[in-house]
Image: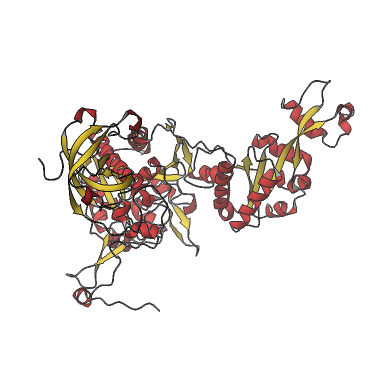
Amino acid sequence: MHAYRTHSCADLTKDAVGQTVRLSGWVHRVRDHGGVLFIDLRDHYGMTQVLCDPDSPVFTEVEKVRSEWCIRIDGTVKARDESLINPKIPTGEVEVFIRDMEVLGTADELPLPVFGDQEYPEETRLKYRFLDLRRESLHDNIMLRSKVVQSIRKRMWDIDFTEFQTPIITASSPEGARDFLVPSRLHPGKFYALPQAPQQFKQLIMVGGFDKYFQIAPCFRDEDPRADRSPTDFYQLDLEMSFVNQQDVFDTIQPVIKGLFEEFGGGRKVDQDWPQISYRDAALWYGTDKPDLRNPIKMQVVSDHFRGSGFAIFAKLLEQDGTEIRAIPAPGGGSRKFCDRMNKFAQEQGLPGMGYIFWRPAVVPNEVFAELEKHPLYSTIMSQQADGLLSQADAVPREYFEPAGPLAKNIGPERTEAIRQQLGLKGGDAAFFLGGKPETFEGVAGRARTVIGEELGLVDQDRFAFAWIVDFPMYEKDDEGKIDFSHNPFSMPQGGMDALSGDPLDVLGYQYDLACNGYELVSGAIRNHKLDVMYKAFEIAGYGADEVEKRFGGMVNAFKYGPPPHGGCAAGIDRIVMLLADTANIREVIMFPMNQRAEDLMMNAPSDPTGEQLRELGLRVIPQE
């Protein structure tokens, strides 16, 4: 017999009744039923119930075991009584009577329980991650991640991509985040960098004549943490292709991503139609470049309805250049209580508030219809009747949608009705309004759209909705008014060199993202492989030719020798698994994550270097004030 086990804790069925078996695992829980001890014994594969009574030669020893002790047991497989079968586990028809036991490892008092899924402080869970990993939900998430990576590799090999590994120690490169620097012992005063992405290397692989590359690549960025992003390192499916345009990249990666979500999505619907939405339209309609299309709300510009209106705040605002008024439709939100709640939400986001109008179903008595033209709501009622929304029968009262709220009173019934018609709203619905320069309120509008959709039950939770976001601007102005890259600096500008002769803020790049359920899953571009265009693109962002050659000498040198047109993308493994596991916290799908302060509480990192280490590197630490 094997030293530790003849079967795993998921193997035994009724076919094994009567056999002598050996199992090893952890004590999940112990139950004492009147002198009969029942233990749920757990290993990586599953659970088996084992039991012991005073007839067992090791009963006294079994009485001592506690949760999370690691033990080995020998015993006889017995069939459970019909009434005691547990259909929730594969071994639920049998149990094992313990004849012998060996304690392989005892456990101190547990800092957090493994049995059950009780909520515990994240700091405790991360410090004792090895225990946290024994918990069923987290264990399942990590196994899901492994299976997803395995599936990705198979899918990429099946479409003729070849896996290569790129360096982990390299030179610093501007990828939109801070580098992790690594001091060089052999070259005092100089530093390597951990790669933010294999960007330059994968382009050089294309120059090297390899047609289709991929890897499951570790990436390192010194970023501020948030729920959907690791503060130190993450993994991505990185790929690059030669002789392709933007649509070729979409056609290649889309079946891979779709297949993953169909395979591991637990039966949730996966959209087959993935629209391509321009960056500007995404910002206008959804307030973000990673929209959640499960939410049907689409924002619209309604400036004309407020220009010269009785609502002085918006009317005066629209006299300024670059301003506009946007409406967020809220189907089903037509109550003052809900509107006031959303107005408070806007104030909590740092805005003065959100204007609103809501429409209530109302009835016009027949006697009013007799002299309809005299009624103050004549135009509103007539427009609703023309829309087929108003009852035509003379014998019954006429229904119409009565607008309410301060905005409706200020701008009058005709403008209010025009807004309702533009937004396609009806009785019981509402609309919220934000105004100014879009960059000042767009983010809040996007968050408000999300909250409205969720609170009104408009979001289809049982679905994965994808959209390609395209036509990103190449450049943006920073806080000091300086032109800088807004996305990947190695992207090809649409229109090539000609596009770079005008206003930089009008230049669009062949850059694209894939959004799913409010998260960015994929980002990529068609690369700028022409040196003259590359020099000009960097010059606009303030990088002279000397600086480009200093920072990207390897790529510049390679592009002198017949670079092919090429492009690619990268898909975030962590975020994909996070969505598939139906969790909003990326640390729930990473085996050993950092906390929100970028600390590894289990391994005590970052830690202070020793004096000897600093001397070897020619460094000293300046104390922080």
Q: Is residue 242 visible?
A: no
Give left or right: position of 61 versus 321. left
The image quadrant of residue 439 is bottom right
Q: Which of the two residues, 18 or 43, is positioned nearer the viewer here?
A: 18
On the image, the x and y values in percent for residue 359 come to: 72, 38
Residue at image point 26% right, 46% down? 216
On the image, the x and y values in percent for residue 502 come to: 47, 51
On the image, the x and y values in percent for residue 432 come to: 65, 46
Q: Establish if 288 lies above or below 127.
A: above
Location of the C terminus by quadrant is: bottom left
The image quadrant of residue 49 is top left
Give left or right: position of 374 versus 38. right
Q: Establish if 151 lies above or below 174.
A: above
Give left or right: position of 139 versus 408. left
Location of the N terminus by quadrant is: top left
On the image, the x and y values in percent for residue 395 come to: 84, 20
| In the image, farthest residue toward the left | 1
Q: Is residue 334 visible?
A: yes
Residue at image point 36% right, 55% down? 230
Q: Which of the two residues, 290 or 200, is positioned nearer the viewer here?
A: 290
Q: Establish if 19 lies above or below 60.
A: above
Q: How many marks?
A: 0
